[in-house]
Image: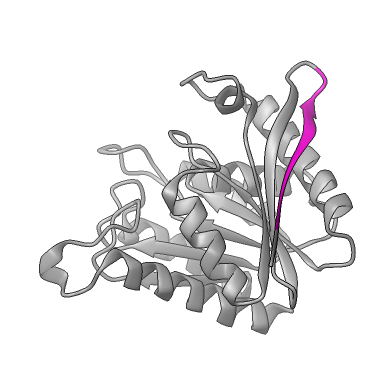
Amino acid sequence: MTTQELRFEATRSSGDVSAILMQPIDARCLLIFGHGAGAGMRHVFMEAMSERLAAKGIATFRYQFPYMEQGRRRPDHKNILLKTIRSAVTAATSAAPGLPLLAGGKSMGGRMTSTAAANEDLVGARGLIFFGFPLHPIGKPGTERGDHLDEVTVPMLFLQGTRDKLADLDLLTPVCDRLGARSTLHVVEGGDHSFHVLKRSGRTDDEVLDELADAVGTWVAKIL
């Protein structure tokens, strides 16, 4: 496996951001992997998930949004986030040419990726993966954040914990049902928004990460 640290221009106004390409020798596809709102591409979840996906033959291109690169806490304006995602797709394609592309991310990174894909297809992306889709704010249940998913034309994989306070499964499940064959929902029993499980569950967080990687590997084999 090779790991490369790269840079690319996110937007003309925001400048360059960092990226990490983790590519197993036998890579069968490449996931363009956006981080969540509160933690960057080097967060332990992003690192651990990328390593497990590599073991499944899935390369990852992790990248920073400009606000995280610049050490700011508040996420960039939506337009900057969306432009950064499109720039990441271009940069990833150049860094690992020839691999089938997938896109998505953790929480905000996933939702912004689907928003970008709903506005205009992400060139080459054959599916989207959401590690904890943030359907609504904590304590404010609703489905409006999922309305744009109707415009996404490629298969989507939702990985969601039963204790996720940003996605009530009673609300998310009908959204996925509405999307029909384009949508696959994998429920992680006992997982919260970070896929942490309580000790009394009888499972460890590492076992949950293994479950997520297995689910992604199975889905990728199916859509590719």
Residue at (58% x, 75% y) in the render: 55
Give the main secondary structure, helix, strand or loop, of the magenta stretch. Answer: strand
Can you say whether 146 is above or below 204 in the image?
Answer: above
Q: Is residue 165 left or right of residue 122?
A: left
**Residue at 80 percent of width and 29 percent of height:** 9
* Residue plotted at (75% across, 32% down): 83
Residue farthest to the left?
A: 200
Residue 18: horizontal and vertical position, in percent? Answer: 68, 35
Q: Position of residue 95 (x, y in %)?
A: 84, 52
- Identify the image quadrant of residue 173: bottom left
**Residue at the (28%, 57%) spot, across then down:** 196
Q: Which residues are magenta?
A: 3-12
| Residue 85 placement (x, y as % from top left) | 71, 40
Which of the 4 image quadrants contains residue 111?
top right
- Asked if residue 11 lies in the magenta stretch, the reply is yes
Give the color scheme: rainbow, by chain, secondary structure or one colour: one colour
The quarter of the rendered structure image containing the N terminus is bottom right
- 17, 13: nearer the viewer: 17
Residue 156 position within the rendered picture, expressed as x and y whole percent measured from the top left: 61, 65
Q: Does the magenta-highlighted stretch encompass residue 75?
A: no
The answer to whether 71 appears left or right of 15 in the picture is left
Please indicate, yes or no, whether residue 54 appears anywhere in the rendered image: yes
